[in-house]
């Protein structure tokens, strides 16, 4: 009898490596390992991950380079929406899970698999993102969560693998749980679980400590076309390469370290360390350019929706009607967001020091206090009177009621 197939989201790490064998032994699946490159890997690393999948017992091991897709279809909309969960977190992991799920589902169809699987535990957001994404794009597909179901400790998993000669990753053991992609890097666990403890320097990889950053500021100019960053210092780059370049330059100056206590969807407050030099720099610039280019009523409504959008994405609701409707609202606003932003990278900050746009709404003749002022001051008096009229009537009639 042929065994049912399962496509597993494979990272090459300990958990998903042992999960291959566990799913085969305990659940009777033939495993297809699917590793997705969303910008986390060093050159050559994905080939090693693919081989490790086979060594751990997968019947097939596949690697997909999804860097451009991740940049264009996930990071791009997040930039347009200025998406920051709790006003701080650029949604690094939350953005990649729907993409990975889409590939799992596609691969399951292609290979006639009966199920897909992920290596998440039961305490995090990622399980929700995988499973809810799967429910919306392939409601009838079975989703296995071997690590959540099995509930093994790290040491027990290592022992279990050793008994079976499973070649678990030899990579230097990190005391932290790391997730990484083009948009940033996340770290949890170990000493970081004490929210009072300052993160040790070895948590960080993509940003320099302030004591080591250059003592001279560096200028960086980003050009946006319709809300999408397209050039760095006049050099056109595809989005994935652009994000990587800004990440590298801002990281040298220690930009983008985020230390926060986060509200997880599963009800836990957790201490998270993020490193997102590129994301923080690009979002800072994009928001600033919107201030120049968006008409104020539109800008206000957009700001009100942005927090909601980030929350939907964080909570695993990427493929849902409300999230799509907000995307449509945001997309309608972005044709105006074309222009350039100058930033100064220095000692942990990406500070905007200038912006310009040929279609910007800044009108110097209206703004100036100098010669050439075109603003009609005589209109202001009547405007103020009418603007304050309802308040004045209220104050006259009811202002005394509750003092
Ligand atoms: N707390 C972050 C989030 O929910 C990061 C999750 C990182 N995931 C991981 N498997 N280490 O988006």
Image (cartoon, helix red, strand yellow):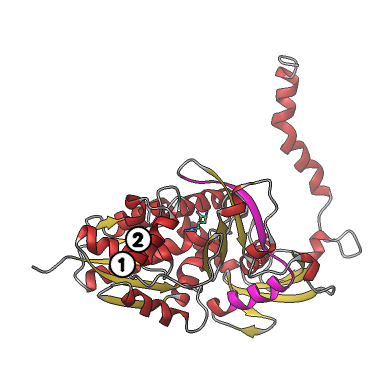
Residues packed near mark 2 inside 10 Å, few (<14), some (14 to 19) or many (20 plus): some
**How many discs mark residues in the rendered view?**
2
Q: Is residue 231 above or below residue 277?
A: below
Q: Residue at x 37, y 68 (%)?
A: 10
Secondary structure at numbered mark 1? loop
Query: Which of 240 and 358 lies nearest the eye of the viewer?
Result: 240
| Residue 98 relative to residue 393: left or right | left
Q: Are marks 2 and 1 in contact (CB under 8 Å)?
A: yes
Q: Report whether residue 91 is seen.
A: yes
Query: Which of 340 and 162 lies nearest the eye of the viewer?
Result: 162
Pinpoint residue 272: horizontal percent, then vertical percent: 59, 53
Locate the C terminus and report the quarter of the image it occupies: top right
Residues packed near mark 1 inside 10 Å, few (<14), some (14 to 19) or many (20 plus): few
Q: Residue at x 64, y 70 (%)?
A: 206
Pinpoint residue 173: horizontal percent, then vertical percent: 53, 66
Secondary structure at numbered mark 2? helix
Residue 188, by quadrant, is bottom right
Q: Report whether residue 332 is seen.
A: no
Query: Which residue has dot 1 on it?
Result: 164
Pinpoint residue 177: horizontal percent, then vertical percent: 52, 59
| Residue 204 relative to residue 101: left or right | right
* Residue at the extreme right of the image, as rendered: 371
Query: Which of 220 and 29 lies nearest the eye of the viewer?
Result: 29
Pinpoint residue 219: horizontal percent, then vertical percent: 77, 76
Q: Which mark is residue 52?
A: none
* Residue at the extreme left of the image, as rendered: 1
Q: Which mark is residue 160?
A: 2
Part of the protein shown in magenta = 242-265
């Amino acid at each position: 009898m042929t065994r049912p197939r399962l496509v597993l989201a494979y990272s090459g790490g300990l958990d998903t490596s042992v999960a291959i064998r566990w799913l085969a032994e305990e659940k009777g699946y033939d495993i297809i390992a699917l590793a997705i490159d969303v910008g986390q890997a060093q050159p050559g690393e994905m080939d090693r991950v693919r081989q490790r999948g086979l060594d751990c017992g997968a019947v097939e091991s596949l690697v997909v380079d999804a860097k451009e897709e991740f940049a264009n279809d996930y990071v791009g909309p997040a930039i347009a929406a200025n998406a920051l969960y709790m006003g701080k977190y650029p949604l690094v992991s939350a953005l990649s899970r729907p993409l990975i799920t889409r590939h799992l589902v596609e691969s399951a169809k292609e290979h006639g698999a009966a199920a897909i699987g992920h290596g998440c535990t039961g305490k995090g957001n990622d399980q929700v993102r995988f499973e809810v994404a799967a429910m919306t794009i392939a409601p009838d597909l079975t989703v296995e969560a071997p690590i959540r179901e099995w509930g093994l400790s790290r040491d027990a998993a290592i022992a279990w693998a050793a008994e079976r000669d499973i070649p678990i990753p030899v990579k230097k053991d990190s005391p932290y749980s790391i997730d990484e992609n083009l948009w940033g890097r996340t770290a949890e666990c170990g000493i970081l679980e004490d929210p009072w403890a300052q993160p040790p320097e070895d948590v960080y990889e993509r940003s320099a400590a302030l004591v080591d950053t250059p003592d001279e500021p560096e200028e960086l100019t980003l050009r946006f076309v319709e809300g999408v960053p397209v050039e760095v210092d006049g050099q056109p780059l595809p989005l994935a390469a652009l994000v990587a370049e800004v990440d590298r330059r801002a990281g040298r100056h220690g930009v983008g370290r985020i230390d926060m206590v986060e509200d997880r969807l599963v009800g836990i407050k957790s201490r998270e360390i993020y490193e997102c030099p590129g994301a923080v720099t690009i979002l800072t610039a994009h928001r600033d350019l919107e201030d120049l280019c968006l008409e104020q009523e539109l800008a206000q409504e957009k700001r009100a929706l942005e927090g909601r959008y980030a929350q939907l994405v964080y909570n695993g609701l990427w493929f849902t009607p409300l999230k799509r409707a907000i995307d449509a609202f945001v997309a309608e606003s972005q044709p105006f967001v074309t222009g350039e932003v100058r930033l100064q990278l220095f000692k942990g900050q990406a500070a905007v020091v200038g912006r310009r746009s040929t279609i910007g709404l800044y009108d110097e003749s209206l703004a100036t206090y100098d010669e050439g002022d075109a603003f009609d001051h005589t209109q202001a008096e009547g405007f103020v009177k009418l603007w304050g009229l309802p308040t004045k009537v209220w104050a006259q009639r009811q202002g005394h009621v509750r003092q």
